[in-house]
Amino acid sequence: MKKTVLLIGLGRFGRHVAEGLVTLGHQVMAVDKDEERVNDILPIVTASQIGDSANESFLRSLGVNNFDLCIVAIAGDFQSSLETTSLLKELGAKFVVSRAERDVQAKFLSRNGADAVVYPERQVAKWTVIRYSWDNVMDFIDLDDNHAIFEVTVPSDWVGRSIGNLDVRKKYGVNVIAVKQGEKTDVVLNPDMVLAEDMTLFVLGENKALQKCFKV
């Protein structure tokens, strides 16, 4: 479903967010007090404005309550981020996502109106650690603090064996939920499917069980 998004803060993270939103077909109003950043993003987004988001009059002029989603991506100025988050909720924002760098910032943002808080640096750091220190892992999605879906290459000692023969669900409590080979992804799996070296697996389970299963 296409959404209208108010994006505040056009540093590196904010720009990446804008590009991602536009790629998905959403309409984006981008805001920053830096004129150069606003001019740079203008060819990409639906509209843009130069202004201080911590200024209530300016923020009110944007019609905050008309947006489906507001993202506060301000970096390096927590006071401005906090004030912007608070003002957005006071002005009727439907859903506010704010950026934090530390836990204490997340607590203040949540108490002052943020419906959700993201940690870009922490999340990228975690992805980097898992992606490049675990031999088989290509990507992952956290479901909560203890469970995740991992995309993994087929371990060498699994090649030529069937999913049913491996029986990782019984042995490790890990579920193979999809198998990808080339451009084809199978989500309805036959226990007799024989695994090949060029396949990747999508596996669901507890983090500790996944570590044990893939010996990391």
Image: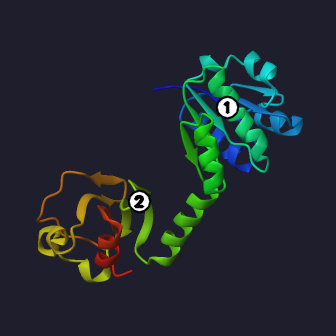
Residue 163 % position (x, y): 17, 68
Residue type at mark 1? Ser
Residue 185 % position (x, y): 30, 53
**Which residue is located at x 21 percent, y 68 percent?**
173
Q: Which residue is mark 2?
A: 145
Is 23 situated above or below 157? above
Is 5 situated above or below 19? above
Is 43 situated above or below 169? above
Q: Is residue 194 left or right of residue 155?
A: left
**Which residue is located at x 81 percent, y 27 percent?**
55
Earlier-in-chain disc, 1 versus 2: 1
Whether residue 28 is visible, yes or no, is no
Residue 70, located in which quarter of the rendered image?
top right
Is 56 situated above or below 123? above
Question: Where is the N terminus found, in terms of image quarters?
Answer: top left
Residue type at mark 2? Asp
Q: Which residue is mark 1?
A: 86
| Numbered tag placed on residue 65 in the rendering | none
Question: Where is the C terminus found, in terms of image quarters?
Answer: bottom left
The one nearer the camera, 67 or 136, is 67
Classed neighbour count for the residue bearing mark 2: other residues with Cα under 10 Å, few (<14), some (14–19), many (≥20): few
- The local secondary structure at tag 2 comes to loop
